[in-house]
Image (spheres, helix red, strand yellow):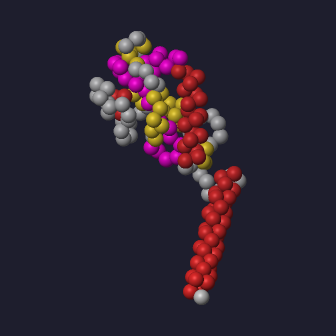
Amino acid sequence: MGGIQRFVILVACLWFVSVDARRKLKRDHQEIINSYDDVSTGDEDYELEPCQCGVFMSQQMGFKDGRRTKPKGPPTGEPVVTYDTDGPSLPCGSIGFKHCISTCLDVILKYLPRAGPVICGAVERDVHREKAFLFVRNCGSEWNPTNFSAGKEFCCTDGKHHKC
């Protein structure tokens, strides 16, 4: 009789565990559906902000003689080049941040062939072997790094671009 009792207890325990797991799964599934509903309906709780793109140079990131390759901390000063998107405002949060980066990359890719003259014309100092880094500002007043850079170094003298 001991074997049958153990079997019944095991089945009862498994049943209780499966019921609890189904409840959690259903609750998690409902939370996911609710989060999609909030985003897709444009719920009034979502704050919409315009997207702004900014290009900062290596010196503004605290780089000295190319010793560091990734920006650390916020940039200093104002961006060399800025772009305010004309499109609709984006929601605050990770979704808006990703759309803002995508929008800025689309704009930058259009101007990339002329980046040297544009940056050298905008910067108010001589530039020697500096990279340009993309930052975005969607919600709030801080510039947020995107980990995207032009991939090449810029050299400018008296506002004119030249080969490094």
Q: Is residue 20 visible?
A: no
Q: Does the magenta stretch include residue 121?
A: yes
Residue drawn at x 58%, y 22% as measured from the top left? 110
| 61 to 142, vertically: above or below | above
- Residue 60 coordinates in the image, percent (x, y): 36, 31
| 156 to 92, vertically: above or below | above
- Residue 123 coordinates in the image, percent (x, y): 41, 23
Residue drawn at x 38%, y 35% as measured from the top left? 71
- Nearest the eye: 144 or 4: 4
- Nearest the eye: 135 or 29: 29
Left or right of residue 67, residue 122 in this image: right
In the rendered image, the residue lying farthest to the right is: 41
- Residue 164 coordinates in the image, percent (x, y): 37, 13
Q: Is residue 91 magenta?
A: no
Left or right of residue 147, residue 58 in this image: left
- Residue 16 coordinates in the image, percent (x, y): 61, 77
Quadrant of the image for the N terminus? bottom right
Magenta stretch: give its range.
Answer: 113-142
Residue drawn at x 34%, y 18% as measured from the top left? 128
